[in-house]
Amino acid sequence: SVIERSQYPDLEIVVVDNASTDGTIDYLEEFQRHHPSVSVIFNRYNVGFAAGNNLGLAAATGEYLVLLNNDTVVTEGWIQTLLHHLSDHPEIGLLGAVTNNIGNEAQIRIDYAGLAQMPERARDYTLTHLGELLFLRTVAFFCVMMPRRTYTLCGPISEEYGTGFFEDDDY
């Protein structure tokens, strides 16, 4: 979905594989052959969520950085929507997306029968709520955008939490 639905000039994609054992490595090698501009970092062992993301953040060169989970499906205009909020509100240091499946205020009610219906429903939701911002005490890192200045100021994600959980709360 990132390749198909990201209309952004000079999009830089860095994929970090945390030592997958389910055929993902073969898939990513083939994917990279078809998309040579995509960088893939293959870890020899699972370094955990935070350390894996830190590898990607360190490799990225853009002015805006996005952390995106491997099971997140993006929709048309996702980058432009996030960038629009950051450019309109330069005081924002970290911006998360809404979703239909999370345990905080970012959860929205949106109905669709399957992934085929999701893009249309997401577009309708986005157009209905254009420009709206919601302050979150905690931004979940399934999909988060930050200006490079945030990363420069805050540094890498804390790896003290182990394999996963709470490092996004900490950031």
Image: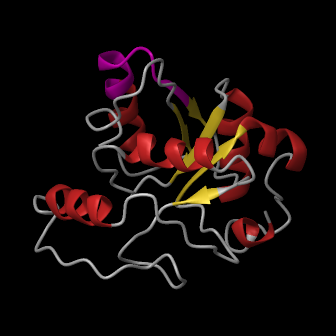
Q: Quadrant of residue 25?
A: top left
Q: 156 or 66: which is nearer to us? A: 66
Q: Is 33 covered by the magenta stretch?
A: yes
Colour mode of the rendering:
secondary structure
Drawn side of residue 82 relative to residue 145, left or right? left
| Residue 141 percent location from the top left of the image | 60, 61
Drawn side of residue 70 relative to residue 166, left or right? left
Q: Quadrant of residue 44?
A: top right
Q: Which residues are magenta?
A: 30-40
- Residue in the image at 50% along x and 48% along y: 82
Q: Quadrant of residue 23?
A: top left
| Residue 14 percent location from the top left of the image | 54, 31
Q: 40 or 108: which is nearer to us? A: 108
| Residue 46 percent location from the top left of the image | 64, 52
Can residue 109 be seen in the rendering of this structure? Answer: yes
On-image quarter of the C terminus: bottom right
- Residue in the image at 69% along x and 28% along y: 59
- Against 26, residue 71 (above or below) is below
- Against 135, residue 35 (above or below) is above
Q: Is 83 covered by the magenta stretch?
A: no
Q: 141 or 54: which is nearer to us? A: 141
